[in-house]
Amino acid sequence: MDTSLSHSPLDGLPIEVSNVLLVNRSHIGDVSMRAHRHRSIPQIVEMIFDRLDLESLKSLSLTCHRWERLFFQYCSRRFVLRIDEKITLDVDVAFMNYDDRRMEKFLLCEEKMKEAVIMLEQTQRVYRTVHIDFHLELATVIYKLKILNRLFTPHLLQQLTVLKLDMGNDPVMHASDISRAVQKMEHLQELYLAFNVRTPCTTECYTMHLVNPTLQKLVIKGITPYVVDCANLWKLDVAESLHVESIIGGKLQRGVDFTGHECYWKIDQLTELSIVNDLKFNLTTRSSILRFYRQLSNVTRLYLYGHTLTQETLQVICESCVQLEEFTIGNLQMDDPNALHYLSNLPNLRQFGIWKILIGIPLSFASVKLPKLEKLLLGCMPIDWPSLASVRSISWLKIKPGPVIDAPICRALSGTFAHLRFLWIDVHTTRIARELLAQLPQMHWLETLVLENIVHLRTLKTLPALPQLERLIIYRCSKKVYERYYNNEALAKLVRDIRWIRAGQKIVEERGIKDSFEC
């Protein structure tokens, strides 16, 4: 960093110029100032320059350069350079057929891309954040390549810290250019790569090598890089089905094609890992999945939403990733209802979530010892509710009960979890609302209540008065619920602060376990 930027912008200015620039507003009404109002700003500045000697002019020039750098730095931090294909048709498209509309959009998009190329050729501003969005596939390949070539020039890459690329369906075409550019970025901290690849078998890209010493966060979708070697990478989000062998190292066999190159992902330094889709591995070498988790000894946050864990894999994770503070499991295939006892090896675990179990008997927490556990997220699955007495330390709970409410869950809310400060209930079926909401008056310490997926009007009718509640959050409700209860006086009397999030929209079943609100 330039040490001169640590000085005041007025350092080096002659005293007489500083006095003019820092003139108090009360002096604006002075007669001498009013006399110059009719003159243009350049004339006034030239008059000031004429009164300065050579040394003062040098000092003034230096200060102006400092101001220029400060302004460019301010703009580069505040503004994002975004180039996308979004266009608005000014003509009435109601009378145009599909081909004509598509051609009209294509021509407008092409014109927009031409302007983007010219802007990149002429700009002197050094951006910190750039977002290129070509997922609509309207831009021609020629202009995509031109824009990337202009963007990947040294003067634009030198200060880039965040790069987000949504590149459509052609990852192989741009892989080499992106790989070379990433390697040259000396200040890159966050990289987002998203491709709309429709055939999962094509996500592996042998020409995509991500090597950068400063990169800290990496998000990947629609492509599997062959090499990921970033020493400072601590957060990795993957929204693709990955072959474990492509991560832990080794040579890959794809049908009759054999590349002969060594694939490698350096992930042993990660502290946060999120995998949305499944992890694939060769059934003949099942140990590879265990090797994968054993090298994650530094991970403190692990989110596995699409991957089905076996009981053996859960044991390896709990024995290897002993620093875990947050752990979410999408699916757990277990033989023993007490399989969660492996979690007791994680003394620092503060948040745990499990969405689904592949077993018919209820999941038990009886043998779980987690003294620091604060947040618990439970999906729609059979649970041994009395066993949750072993995790009394939690103050934050999210549950998605099944279609039938049994007495144990009601007793758990009014007894074991009566001390909760935050409760999130997914009321996806109306039958569960009355029984669960009736327990809330007994939870005297409850401060925040989240009700998710409210479809029917009668759900909120069953809400009792909750004087202890500080905030009610209605998260995803139907349009009729929003229109009936928004600014409703009767509901306002029950709760002091009501917030509506994603209200009035069509409710679609989601995994939902990732959503989180702060206490």
Image: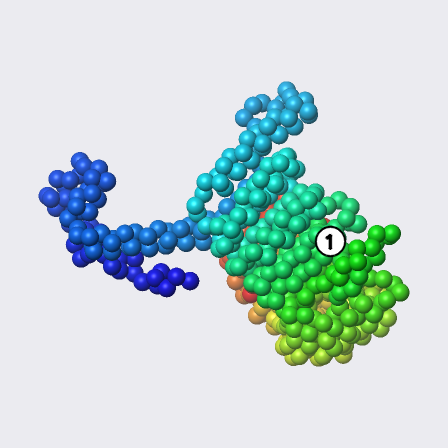
**Whether residue 263 can be seen here:** yes
* Numbered marks: total: 1
Task: Using the image, determine if residue 320 lies above or below residue 111.
Answer: below
Residue drawn at (78%, 70%), measured in percent from left and top? 291
Q: Position of residue 392 (x, y in %)?
A: 66, 76
Which residue is nearer to you in this view: 401 or 407?
A: 401
Q: Position of residue 255 (x, y in %)?
A: 86, 52
Residue type marked 1:
Tyr
Residue 505 image-quadrant placement: top right
Left or right, 3 with reference to 44:
right
Which residue is nearer to you in this view: 220 or 187?
A: 187
Residue drawn at (84%, 52%), measured in percent from left and top? 257
Q: Residues within 10 Å of mark 1 (few under 14, many from 20)?
A: some
Residue drawn at (20%, 56%), measured in percent from left and top? 55
Mark 1: secondary structure: strand
Which residue is nearer to you in this view: 231 or 258?
A: 258
Which residue is nearer to you in this view: 309 or 384?
A: 309
- Residue located beneath label 1 in the image: 206
